Image (cartoon, rainbow, N blue to C red):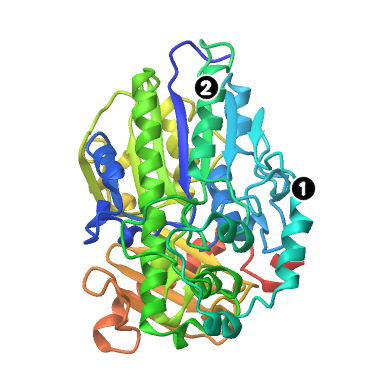
Amino acid sequence: MPAAGLPNVLLVILDTVRADRLSLYGYGRPTSPALERLAKRGIRFDEARSAAPWTLPSHASFFTGRWPHELHVGWNDPLRTDFPMLADYMASHGYQTAGFVANLQYCSYDAGLDRGFAHYDDYPFDLVHLRPLRAAILAEFAWNAATWACVSIKLERYNPILHWLLAPERKDAGVINDQFLGWLEHRGDRRRPYFAFLNYYDAHSPYLPPEGTRFRFGPGPRSVLDFLVLVERWKEIDKLRLGQNFIDLILDSYENCLVYLDWRLGRLFVELQRRGAMENTLVIIAADHGEELGDHELFEHGESLYRPEIRVPLLVLLPNGGHAGMVVRETVSLRDLPSTILDVVGLAEDSPFPGRSFARQWQPHGSDRPEDGGDAFSELPAPNPAFPSLGRSPAAKGPMVSLARGRHVYIRNEGDGREQLFDCAADPRELRDLSGVAEGQPVLQELRNRLDRLRATTGKDIDRKSINN
């Protein structure tokens, strides 16, 4: 049992949220006013990077402090059970632990992420007899784009029946909020601190906020054809061949999902503040990965190690309210979340988790130490098996690794040997590859060597076969 007064920990992960589409990071549309308000009370990290561009390995890294290749996490392989888990460690020190997840494919108990949580809300109670009905209706009608383009049915509003037919079931942010707040209200011994994990799925494809949500940007889907493009045929259509009206629909819809998620987050933290539940609580808000929206001719995630998929938002609100409004511009890796959490709450001694605490960034002169410059390693052993970019993923040519340090990121394909180097400060869209020009050679060699040393100290190299078998 820990000493009384240890801080609570609230870890909030926003599935599929890329940093550069948030007004929190300067985006032109007001997509994240609630996060902006929260940032004034905490520390904003401008160059946080995920260890992987898809959900399971990035979450596994959050909870173990390990790189994905150490964990052998694959698209169809759950998290290994032989590494210590953050929730387990905190529970062993007297914390109440609870998880509330909306991504039911890669954050559920069968993915292995529930280990150490005494309470874990994943699969909802469901009226399963409605699923065959939905399937029968879809089979009865020819749900293809050509047919409905001819019919040209227009919707005056966001039709709930059509939404039920064409949009998959998902737990929206309102459900996650209610589940967490309900647990918080009835969690029992209030003298014990808690560690709560919230996973929100609202920005993940299909980009459809809950039925009845007002669209802030653009008109939203207004015809059956719009729904088919966004949902039913999304995986199989070539998004690069879509007309500008559909490209606008995709971008507007993703950003409307961000607005909805941000609104729900704002309501959650207002309620926590009203209950006095923000006192003595460490709050960390981040994303597991970003999203390609046509960048480099790619869509969705798990397709590359480019910035849209790897750079993510990160806010840290300290229990004592310290360093409010601070901005950290150095590169950090979310793999360091366990070491950071245990450092802040005072349980770092004898911690089994590797990595370095983010506290070095806000401690006096912490970031002046050369060793605290920050390396962020990321990896992708194989492309998204759903092929959202129809085979254009560079990972189709072999496993990919990258290392970001300072303003530069180095990307290497282990299959064809291609190397890329980008100056993300001068070229945030990563359009100018410096690996083949003279000015880039010193940095290229330095990052290549640093990457090789890092991999040599964390076990064997990434191997597609070992990851996927």
Identify the mark at residue 184; answer none if there is no mark: 2
Identify the mark at residue 444; answer none if there is no mark: none
Q: Quadrant of residue 461?
A: bottom right
- Residue at 59%, 50% (x, y): give it: 170
Identify the mark at residue 128; answer none if there is no mark: 1
Q: Quadrant of residue 275?
A: top left
Type of amino acid under label 2: Leu
Q: Position of residue 352 (x, y in %)?
A: 58, 37
- Residue at 46%, 66% (x, y): give it: 155
| Left-right relation of 126 to 284 | right
Type of amino acid under label 1: Val
> What is the crowding at mark 2: few (fewer than 14 residues within 10 Å), some, or many (at least 20)?
some
Q: Position of residue 124 (x, y in %)?
A: 67, 40
Residues 198 and 274: in front is 274
Residue 265, above or below 392: above
Q: Position of residue 242 (x, y in %)?
A: 45, 84
Which numbered disc, 2 or 1, marks the residue that appears first in the sequence? Answer: 1
Residue 89, above or below 447: above
Give SS at disc 1: loop
Callout count: 2
**Is there a contact, CB below 8 Å, between mark 2 and mark 1?**
no
| Left-right relation of 246 to 233 | left
> What is the crowding at mark 1: few (fewer than 14 residues within 10 Å), some, or many (at least 20)?
few
Distance from Cα at disc 2 to Cα at disc 1: 29 Å
Q: Quadrant of residue 431?
A: bottom left
